[in-house]
Amino acid sequence: MTQQTKTPSNVVPVLVAMLVCDVAVAEPTTGKKTLVGIFDRIRAAKFPTQHPMSLYLKLTNAEGYYKTEIKFRQLKTGSVLAGASGELQAIDRLASVDMCIPFPPLLIPESGRYDFQLWANSMFLGSTVLDAELQQ
């Protein structure tokens, strides 16, 4: 059996949207995405805390094969607290590609700023921030 090698694309995709929400789902027959509870701030009674969340991504200008990676980081320390990886195959640079990525409850060790970073073929495409604060 021969293994087919996937050549990484040199085309740099453009990140159009990156949203954090409670739930993101794709309708199986139409592919339409539904986002529930979009947010960029978490208020917790105490830290550490955990919070389930999903990430919605929309890209354009993608063509070819991409090995993707998402990093959830604490900005103060630069520590990667969680991540996800996958593959993306895009055919038409003019079309957009979107996806929903569910995460299990993510650990948020203390109040402060966190981010989700998107990487494709070791190219940084962008990020979105999440602020965690003590509930008043």
Image: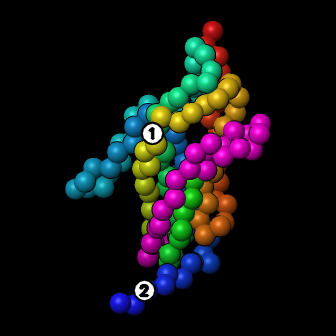
Q: Which residue is drawn at 22% across and 56% down?
A: 29
Magenta residue check for 10: no
Residue 127 picture location, percent across and down:
64, 49
**Farthest right residue in view:** 76
Tell which residue pokes out farthest to the bottom in this image. 2
Residue 26 coordinates in the image, percent (x, y): 32, 50
| Residue at screen point 45% across, 72% down | 90
Residue type of the residue flagged with mark 2 = Gln
Within the magenta stretch, is there residue 79?
yes
* Element marked by disc 1: strand
Q: In this view, does 109 lie to the left or right of 91?
A: right
Q: Name the residue under label 1.
A: 104
Q: Vertically, is 5 above or below 58?
A: below
Q: Is the magenta stretch mostly helix, strand or loop?
A: strand
Three-letter code, disc 1: Pro
Q: Residue drawn at (46%, 43%), measured in percent from left and top?
A: 103
Q: Is residue 128 visible?
A: no
Q: How crowded is mark 2: few (under 14 residues within 10 Å), some or many (20 or more)?
A: few
Residue at x 77% of width, y 36% of height: 76
At mark 2, the secondary structure is loop
User: How many circles with numbers are drawn on the protein?
Assistant: 2
The first of marks 1 and 2 along the sequence is 2
Q: Could you tell whether 41 is left or right of 4 in the image?
A: right
Q: Mark 2 points at which residue?
A: 3
Q: Give the range drawn in magenta.
A: 71-94
Q: Nearer the viewer, residue 83 or 128?
A: 83
Q: Residue furthest front?
A: 1
- In which quadrant of the rendered view does residue 1 lie? bottom left
